[in-house]
Image (spheres, rainbow, N blue to C red):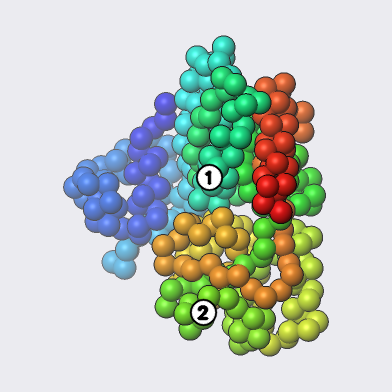
Amino acid sequence: MYNPQLETFLCVAEAGSFNKAAERLYISPPAVIKQINLLEESLDVQLFVRTHRGLQLTSAGRSLVQDAKYIIQYCKDSVTRAKNAMQAGESVIRIGTSPMTPAQVLVDLWPRLQEDCPGTKFQLVPFDNTPENAREILGNLGKNIDVVAGIFDETMLNLRRCAGLEISREPICCAVSVHHRLAGKDRLTVQDLYGENLMLMRRDWSHYVDMLRDDIWKNHPQIHIVDFDFYDVGAFNQCENNNCVLMAVENWRYVHPLLKILPVDWNYTIPFGLLHAREPSPLVQNFLRAVEKATRNRRTVNP
């Protein structure tokens, strides 16, 4: 579907050397070098500057890194669309899943959904959680992916041009490295965060996060807020590597094995639910109604 040398190129760009990339790809360094040389020749651009200190991406290389990720993901989506065409006569709900958008909530609800969605099947569609994919997938829900589970608010829905069905209000928690001084606690107070670097998504990403931010700035200046732009594995790595504290929700407990998610004694929550197209298909509409009913019944049973 696409030039496989692109994946080798991305691996080299991430590893910073031919030898390290070769180890990750389980091929020899000469084979990696040959693929990069062929890719540069076919594109007629220089992608790396070779120095005695290692490899550095050229401006063309940096540009291609982002485009290559999109090309590879687009080709994978093309295969998904082809498979969907084969399943056109079936009732299939395509659920996008990534570390930050786990599908477990729907798995837990599935026994309650079967009564209202007889014959409907789940198809999990994994995707890389990158800014480019977030824009592409959420802005085109209903084409390759029908629903994605995640946190949201009206600001985010308008930004991504999609709609949301709230399933729950998730307490805003904090994630810390298992080696952090706070990791031994079962629950945090606001005062526990004094002197810490607290990673929060930039202002205007979520009204709920901004309320927490304003409270901290006004009443708890001892907490240093660190802004970041996107929730992905890189944000979790930054938290672990720099010994920071990261705003998180309990549903992300499996994203990073070296991070522990702790509840905090504050009354801040954020909606969690299903993101879907603004005008979903009849099949998806019925599925969403079933989810809403199952969620309502679960709240009645477990008030």
Q: Quadrant of residue 280?
A: top right
Q: Is residue 291 visible?
A: yes
Say whether disc 1 or disc 2 marks the residue closer to the N-terminus. Answer: 1
Residue depicted at 28% across the width and 51% down the height: 24
Q: Looking at this view, name the residue that lies furthest to the top.
A: 89
Closest to the observer, 82 or 170: 170
Report crowding for label 1: few under 14, some 14 to 19, many 20 or more residues within 10 A (C-alpha): few
Residue 290 drawn at (x, y percent): 69, 31
Q: What residue type is labelled 1?
A: Gln
From the viewer's perspective, is residue 262 above or below residue 219?
above
Q: Locate the N terminus and report the quarter of the image it occupies.
A: top left
**What residue does disc 2 label?**
185
Residue 58 drawn at (x, y percent): 45, 55
Numbered disc 2: secondary structure: loop
Numbered disc 1: secondary structure: helix
The answer to whether 27 appears left or right of 47 in the picture is left
**What residue does disc 1 label?**
104
Q: Is residue 49 visible?
A: no
Residue depicted at 56% across the width and 19% down the height: 119
